[in-house]
Image: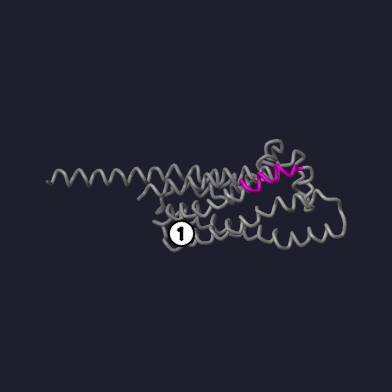
């Protein structure tokens, strides 16, 4: 059923919305102190806000692999194997992402405590155990974006060639540029840059998924018409 192209795309869009909202609650800092590596931007974030962001983000992230399956369906006509690798690698990245975002409320609570050698040691352990996972997410997003660009440019996928310009990595880079050029706007989108990128990508992708679904419905209707006339 071609409707799965649309349904899985909507699941990916919902994931981007929920995780984006959850991560915004976890990370947004009015002073935009995101450049430092000492989690200073988390100071002052209330525990109830972090807890809400934690649950919204974690449960929302579980829908991202469904969104990866949507990308697989849209790329499959161009190259089945590489499209399937996008699904596998992307899903692994987002499953690792669930673990990472599930740790953010804890580091936020830790940062609220008074400084000391023990706290500093726990922060170092956190960076080793969880910030390393963030690198995995970045790598898998880069891989996914590269394959999207390549297969869409072949002209054989369900996407137009120009969707290569809306690959997630490029959208993330543009997000950071927005922060540098217009910080008053960018400070709201930069803490959730990956989710903003995937929201834009899935929103565009659903439009073409609807076309795929409509084309399939038209072919079914035409076949039914021919069968009726032949009777």
- The rendered magenta stretch, by its main secondary structure, is classed as helix
Q: Residue furthest left?
A: 231
Q: Quadrant of residue 96?
A: bottom right
Q: Quadrant of residue 117?
A: bottom right
State the residue position of label 1.
83
In percent of width and height, residue 168 lies at: 56, 50
Q: Is residue 209 left or right of residue 218?
A: right
Q: Which stretch appears magenta?
A: 45-56
Q: Is residue 229 left or right of residue 2?
A: left
Q: Front-most of 104 and 183?
A: 104
Q: Is residue 213 left or right of residue 44?
A: left
Q: Residue furthest top?
A: 184
Identified at 29% across, 43% down, the residue is 218
Q: Front-most of 153 and 179?
A: 179
Binning the other alpha carbons within 10 Å of mark 1 as few (below 14), some (14 to 19) or many (20 upward) gives many
Identified at 63% across, 46% down, the residue is 193
In percent of width and height, residue 41 lies at: 77, 46
Q: Is residue 95 above or below residue 191?
A: below
Q: Residue furthest right?
A: 116
In percent of width and height, residue 230 lies at: 13, 46
Q: Is residue 49 magenta?
A: yes
Q: Is residue 206 above or below residue 106?
A: above
In percent of width and height, residue 139 lies at: 61, 60
Identified at 43% across, 49% down, the residue is 159
Q: Quadrant of residue 97?
A: bottom right
Q: Front-most of 18 and 150?
A: 18
């Amino acid at each position: 059923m071609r409707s799965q192209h649309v349904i899985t795309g909507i699941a990916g869009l919902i994931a981007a919305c929920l995780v984006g909202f959850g991560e915004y609650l976890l990370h947004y800092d009015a002073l935009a102190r995101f450049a430092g590596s000492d989690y200073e931007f988390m100071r002052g974030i209330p525990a109830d806000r972090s807890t809400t962001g934690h649950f919204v983000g974690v449960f929302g992230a579980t829908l991202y692999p469904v969104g990866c399956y949507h990308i697989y369906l849209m790329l499959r006509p161009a190259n089945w194997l590489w499209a399937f690798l996008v699904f596998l690698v992307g899903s692994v990245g987002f499953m690792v992402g669930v673990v990472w975002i599930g740790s953010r409320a804890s580091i936020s609570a830790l940062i609220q405590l008074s400084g000391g050698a023990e706290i500093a040691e726990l922060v170092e352990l956190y960076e080793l155990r969880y910030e390393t996972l963030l690198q995995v997410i970045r790598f898998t997003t880069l891989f996914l974006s590269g394959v999207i660009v390549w297969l869409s440019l072949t002209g054989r996928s369900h996407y137009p060639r120009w969707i290569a310009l809306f690959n997630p990595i490029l959208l993330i880079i543009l997000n950071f540029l927005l922060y540098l050029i217009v910080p008053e706007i960018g400070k709201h989108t930069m803490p959730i840059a990956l989710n903003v990128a995937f929201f834009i990508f899935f929103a565009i992708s659903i439009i073409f998924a609807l076309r795929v679904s409509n084309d399939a419905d038209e072919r079914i209707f035409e076949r039914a018409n021919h069968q009726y006339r032949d009777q």
